[in-house]
């Protein structure tokens, strides 16, 4: 803001507040709390959508919190977030046009903006950002030092490597811009009430229904359908009154105004120099020199004063003096100019430097827009529009996974945490944003049960939603870099352990919810795209939750139907009495960042006439992921002898309760997030250390190794596995990201109608796996080119140690609404922009590692077979039930054949038109388990002639499965009330003796056979999608 307005605002502090002459209504559709740029923008955009029955309540005067003293930068350059960049672009456009609409100037001046790069690492960062910003429509140019000097002649450029220049960025007047938004709001029928301090938000049940406030005429109540907390640095205090978490924290923010300087041209651009902690622009005939210190000073940690309006903080000259010396060194002439004022005022920051926006998970219809981290002016109109659209439409229209207020955690309320965190958070604004850099303050906030054991094993921790989780083991981080980190070899060894032997990943930070009650299954079935009630009594299902309003993604998670005995013995899942013995009980597992989002989604899905309990058991259960070719053998040796058959026979997505060490209640799910044979173990926290020790005892001869999150990231990206909030978000459809295979169309689920509609449309955008060719490092935001045209960006990336190159997931979109099918992808020449350099790349709908998913099924092994045989022999001698060789299979629904080696023989049979004989065993699944795995005791034989094949059709697993199911239906066996497990053998009947060509486990059929055979196919475009096929096979 300009110096004259600064003086005017100081005078205004003593002036009485003003209210409307007309009476304040008793009801409004929406009540907006706070009259800064965010509050007025939200109100303005609600009115723009036709919601004019809106009242804005401001405790003092408009802009009196932090808006009035903002520096007013309007910059579109600088963010790798598409959402933030769109907010900035829209804000600039609105500031440019608002005066024509309202008659009130915003003070927008497109004087230009230059970001200075003064080191190779900063140059690398800004080139990455510039490429992404250009793709998002920001016209940024890299310029040289002489160009910088020409644009801002007083700027010292001897150490400048480059500048990043946006010609039509610039600045606005924060007060004028806010007043223009308020004027526009009022002109559409909205009401602004100044001098109205909200004292509480009214609630009924789990819904906000209005506010109580101290107004110009005394205490009053305003009922409303929606409440929006735009209270700025008071947002946390206001939220606490209603139990709503808004963990923003104020800190001191400084800028210096010099006296007039003869050589300053008011049209010069804004110059940002992060290496010297400063931004500089002309102001009032002199210069404004702003600071973002390397370590900030928290302000009002306990409570911000309620009567603080147009307020200032006494500057701490001693603390900021060294920073001012660095800042003024960029424009040496400023050091000789007189100081008009050193201004210090509060600004509020979120713990992760991302805004806090959206509907509060604690209360329906209570929205938050706060914690803008000193970018309120340059994103305010965009934020307000997003919140308004969210309220009107019932869902956000931009990716909010990184800004949603429900990402926060309760520990962030703690004053000690906020005080420590804000000092570092503000300081990070102008530091180089290295890809492997992690916050150091406010730690450790949460410790997982194995923290001490992992620390002793050499874990290097990072905070994951507050939890201290191992990032890798061994050497310390070393110097930060954009390329190969110092811990690269440690990371590579952990990655290789999972691919070749076995690794243990502690993922106890995952969100876990126990769901039980007579209506638990109904609630979860509505939420989940997949059928979460398996045919067997227990099992785990990979599924998606979708928005009711848009059909787009809301959560990516697994739902396990758990054994009743495990639930009862651990006491983790609630019971409602003896009558609920037969009700299924579930464990829902979501990612750490979706903790409160998933929890509130679950709670809100429960209807008034339903009985269902949801309990957060995240801290009560350790989650140990045992992954790799040797994982079955390690687990089999670790469990009690009586449970070894259970482990050996556990099918993919099967669940069992086993005993390990002194813990008799370890829940085991056969599942993977790394693309290998593997298991997830859910262990009561008090037993975690013992189970961990027993696993390492059992795994010593198999090379079991601790594995951190760096390896987890590289492993999952090699397999193309998705991560909601990173490479998929709330604006993506299932078909866009290749997750349509999770849908069971035979049942209803939220968003189903949208999915069916989307299924029939042309696929113009696809999430693809990409690999950069050569020695290049990708992290996030790199632009993807097809035949020289920018068509997408990398959403998540890592280094793929199995493929020796950068690997990631990218969203690409075919131009001109063309079909982004496999042919379009395979016919293109692909490149990536890595920090301004074009590098060759491969792009595919298939994952680059094990695209057929053979390793997940345990068909290939990379560790010593002799070691496995030795271990198996020991177990056979120790366990009589394992002494007999089962001809059926040790894992009755594991696919054991049709590997690549058989393809030639199958093709040969197809060419000569062989007559095929199919032999099968029909086994009742429950009887099979009770028989101790002796298939012959409980099996019914089935043999029939297969159809004659012509040379045009190659034999396949699907063909054989289909024939078995058809034969079952023909014999009336699909009507039997129990599921069958079928093992079929395909013989060549041409010769005198039938020769087995291939054997296959058809899977569970029987009463489910008809629905399995009639399952809807994907759309024509999706049918071409090899990635969807691979995902369905591997996920």
Image (spheres, rainbow, N blue to C red):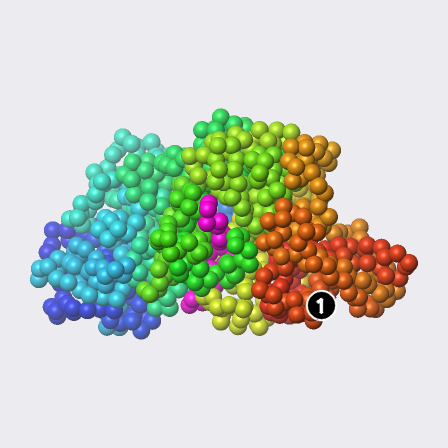
The secondary structure type at the circle numbered 1 is: helix
260 relative position to 537: left or right: left
Check residue 230 for magenta coloring.
no
152 relative position to 924: left or right: left
971 or 504, which lies in front? 971
- Residue at the right extreme, as displayed: 992
> Magenta region: which residues?
543-566
Q: Residue at x 57, y 72 (%)?
A: 761
595 or 62, which lies in front? 595
Residue 884: image quadrant is top right
838 or 452, which lies in front? 452
Q: Position of residue 688 (x, y in %)?
A: 47, 34
Q: Position of residue 378 (x, y in %)?
A: 36, 55
The local crowd at label 1, few if under 14, some if 14 to 19, many if 20 or more residues have their Cα within 10 Å, is: some
Residue 120 in sight: no
- Residue at the left extreme, as displayed: 217
Residue 524 in sight: yes
Q: Residue at x 52, y 35 (%)?
A: 660
Residue ID for mark 1: 967
Check residue 550 for magenta coloring.
yes
Q: Position of residue 184 (x, y in %)?
A: 27, 68
792 to 692, vertically: above or below: below
1007 to 339, vertically: above or below: below
Residue 981: image quadrant is bottom right
312 to 614, vertically: above or below: above
């Amino acid at each position: 803001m300009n110096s004259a307005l600064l003086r005017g605002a100081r005078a205004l502090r003593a002036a009485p507040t003003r209210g409307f002459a007309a009476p304040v209504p008793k009801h409004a559709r929406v009540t907006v709390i706070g009259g800064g740029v965010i509050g007025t923008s939200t109100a303005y955009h609600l009115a723009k959508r036709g919601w004019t029955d809106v009242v804005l309540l401001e405790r003092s005067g408009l802009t009196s919190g932090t808006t009035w003293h903002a520096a007013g930068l309007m910059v579109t350059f600088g963010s790798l977030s598409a959402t933030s960049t769109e907010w900035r672009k829209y804000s600039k456009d609105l500031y440019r046009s608002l005066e024509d609409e309202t008659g009130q100037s915003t003070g927008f001046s497109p004087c230009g903006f230059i970001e200075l790069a003064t080191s190779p690492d900063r140059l690398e960062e800004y080139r990455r950002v510039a490429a992404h910003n250009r793709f998002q429509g920001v016209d940024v140019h890299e310029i040289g030092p002489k160009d910088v000097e020409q644009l801002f002649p007083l700027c010292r450029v001897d150490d400048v490597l480059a500048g990043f220049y946006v010609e039509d960025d610039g600045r606005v007047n924060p007060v004028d811009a806010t007043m223009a938004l308020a004027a526009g709001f009022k002109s559409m029928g909205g009401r602004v009430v100044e001098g109205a301090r909200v004292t509480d938000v009214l609630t009924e049940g789990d819904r906000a229904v209005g506010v109580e406030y101290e107004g110009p005429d005394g205490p009053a109540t305003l009922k409303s359908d929606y409440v929006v907390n735009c209270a700025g640095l008071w947002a946390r205090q206001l939220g606490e009154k209603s139990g709503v978490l808004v963990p923003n924290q104020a800190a001191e923010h400084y800028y210096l105004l010099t006296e007039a300087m003869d050589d300053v041209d008011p049209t010069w651009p804004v110059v940002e120099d992060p290496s010297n902690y400063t931004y500089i622009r002309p102001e009032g005939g002199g210069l404004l020199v702003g600071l973002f210190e390397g370590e900030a000073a928290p302000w009002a940690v306990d409570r911000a004063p309620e009567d603080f309006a147009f307020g200032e903080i006494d500057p701490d000259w001693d603390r900021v003096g060294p920073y001012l010396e660095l800042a003024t060194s960029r424009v040496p002439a400023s050091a000789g100019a007189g100081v008009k004022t050193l201004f210090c005022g509060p600004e509020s920051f979120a713990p992760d430097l991302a805004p806090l926006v959206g509907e509060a998970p604690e209360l329906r219809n209570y929205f938050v827009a706060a914690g803008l981290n000193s970018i309120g002016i340059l994103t305010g109109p965009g934020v307000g529009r997003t919140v308004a659209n969210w309220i009107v439409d019932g869902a956000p229209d931009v990716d909010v996974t990184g800004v949603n207020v429900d990402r926060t955690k309760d520990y962030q309320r703690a004053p000690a945490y906020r005080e420590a965190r804000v000092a570092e958070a503000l300081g990070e604004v102008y530091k180089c944003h290295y890809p492997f850099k992690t916050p150091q303050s406010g730690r450790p906030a949460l410790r997982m049960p194995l923290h001490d054991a992992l620390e002793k094993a050499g874990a290097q921790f990072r905070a994951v939603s507050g939890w201290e989780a191992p990032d890798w083991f061994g050497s310390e981080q070393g110097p930060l870099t954009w390329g190969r980190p110092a811990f690269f070899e440690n990371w590579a060894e952990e990655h290789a352990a999972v691919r070749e032997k076995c690794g243990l990943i502690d993922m106890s930070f995952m969100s876990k919810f126990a769901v039980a009650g007579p209506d638990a299954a109904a609630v979860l079935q509505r939420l989940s795209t997949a059928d979460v009630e398996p045919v067997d009594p227990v099992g785990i299902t990979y599924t998606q939750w979708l928005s009711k309003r848009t059909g787009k993604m809301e959560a990516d998670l697994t739902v396990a139907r758990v054994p009743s005995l495990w639930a009862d013995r651990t006491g983790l899942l609630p019971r409602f009495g003896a009558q609920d013995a037969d009700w299924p009980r579930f464990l829902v597992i979501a990612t750490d960042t979706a903790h409160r989002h998933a929890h509130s989604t679950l709670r809100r899905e429960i209807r008034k006439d339903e009985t269902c309990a949801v309990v957060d058991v995240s801290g009560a259960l350790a989650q140990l992921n045992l992954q790799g070719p040797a994982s079955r053998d390690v687990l089999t040796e670790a469990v009690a002898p009586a449970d070894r058959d259970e482990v050996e026979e556990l099918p993919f997505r099967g669940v069992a309760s086993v005993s390990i060490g002194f813990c008799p209640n370890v829940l085991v799910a056969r599942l993977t997030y790394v693309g290998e044979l593997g298991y997830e173990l859910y262990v009561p926290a008090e037993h975690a250390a013992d189970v961990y020790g027993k696993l390492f005892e059992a795994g010593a001869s198999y090379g079991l190794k601790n594995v951190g999150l760096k390896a987890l990231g590289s492993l999952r990206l090699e397999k193309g596995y998705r991560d909601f909030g990173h490479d998929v978000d709330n604006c993506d459809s299932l078909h866009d990201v290749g997750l349509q295979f999770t849908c069971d169309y035979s049942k209803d689920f939220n968003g189903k109608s949208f999915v069916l509609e989307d299924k029939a449309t042309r696929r113009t955008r696809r999430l693809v796996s990409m690999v950069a060719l050569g020695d290049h490092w990708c992290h996030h935001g790199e632009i993807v080119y097809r035949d020289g045209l920018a068509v997408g960006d990398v959403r998540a990336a890592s280094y793929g140690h199995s493929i020796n190159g950068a690997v990631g997931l990218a969203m690409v979109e075919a131009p001109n609404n063309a079909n982004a099918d496999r042919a379009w992808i395979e016919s293109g020449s692909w490149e990536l922009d890595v920090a301004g350099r074009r590098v060759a790349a491969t792009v595919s709908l298939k994952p680059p590692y094990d695209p057929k998913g053979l390793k997940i099924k345990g068909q290939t092994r990379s560790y010593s077979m002799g070691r496995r045989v030795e271990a198996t022999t020991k177990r056979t001698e120790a366990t009589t039930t394992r002494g007999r060789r089962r001809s059926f299979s040790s894992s009755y629904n594991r696919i054991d054949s049709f590997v690549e080696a058989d393809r030639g023989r199958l093709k040969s049979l197809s060419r000569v038109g062989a007559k095929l004989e199919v032999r099968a065993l029909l086994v009742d699944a429950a009887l099979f388990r009770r028989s101790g795995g002796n298939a012959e005791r409980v099996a019914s034989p089935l043999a029939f002639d297969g159809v004659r094949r012509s040379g045009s059709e190659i034999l396949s697993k699907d063909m054989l499965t289909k024939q078995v199911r058809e034969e079952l239906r023909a014999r009336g066996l699909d009507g039997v009330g129990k599921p069958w497990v079928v093992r079929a053998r395909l013989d060549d009947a041409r010769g005198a003796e039938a020769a087995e060509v291939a054997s296959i486990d058809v899977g569970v059929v029987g009463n489910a056979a008809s629905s399995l055979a009639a399952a809807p196919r994907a759309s024509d475009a999706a049918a071409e999608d090899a990635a969807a096929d691979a995902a369905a096979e591997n996920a």
